[in-house]
Image (spheres, rainbow, N blue to C red):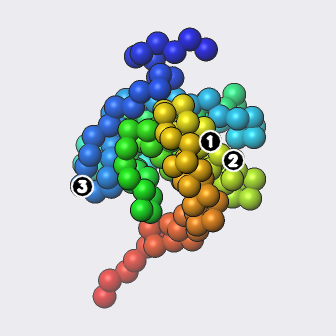
Amino acid sequence: MNQMPDSEFAPILYYRKIKSYKYENDRVRSFVLPKIFWPTSSIVVRGHCGETLNSDTVFLSLDTTGILRVYRAYKWDGPSGPAVDTPAFMRGSMAHDALYQMIRMGFLDIDKHRLPADDFLGEICKQDGMWWIRRRLVMRACKIFARKAASRDADSEYGKLVIAP
């Protein structure tokens, strides 16, 4: 696939630092996922985020040909743990967070998709020039420590109906 600099498939990420999460995507970014992620029907994640967006705002989509789209205004927390937020880590962290969010929401299966999501993070980081030793450490940390972040319990405190006195 020919990747033009301003194509949604280009290995360029436009984002800004924000207070509420850490980063906000500024342009649609698309990733071609391995076949294991291809759903039988398209997945669309909608949500509310901030005052200017409503519940019809699409943040993520995954079509039946394995195209993951991360839309403008998607928010993520960047690389996790003791990782340093460098340019070689940003696209991978966004795609990885999007896949983990789809796992937590039940659109993807944790047992089938978590480790391939970790591998995909490594592939994107490699494309973006992450040094192989650092990439190996990142991958090892994901495989050992990240299962909880992909579990539905990770979001258990969010979205609960709370009744005050």
**Residue nearest the viewer, comparing 11 with 16:** 11
Q: x and y percent of residue 117 in the render?
A: 63, 47
Tell me the residue at 42%/62% (across/down). Answer: 82
Judging by the rendered image, the residue that carries numbered circle 3 is 19
Q: x and y percent of residue 47 in the render?
A: 43, 48
- Dot 1: element: helix
Task: Please state which amino acid type lies under the numbered disc 1.
Answer: Phe
Pointer 3 or 1: first along the chain: 3
Task: Please state which amino acid type lies under the numbered disc 2.
Answer: Pro
Q: Is residue 159 left or right of residue 132?
A: left
Which mark identifies residue 116? 2
- Calculate the distance from the C-alpha at mark 2 to the C-alpha at mark 1: 6 Å
- Calculate the distance from the C-alpha at mark 3 to the C-alpha at mark 1: 27 Å
- Dot 2: element: helix
Judging by the rendered image, the residue that carries numbered circle 1 is 120
Q: x and y percent of residue 137 in the render?
A: 56, 55
Pointer 2 or 3: first along the chain: 3
Task: Please state which amino acid type lies under the numbered disc 3.
Answer: Lys
157 relative to 36, above or below = below
Residue 55 in view:
no
Label 1 neighbour load within 10 Å: few <14, some 14-19, many 20+: many
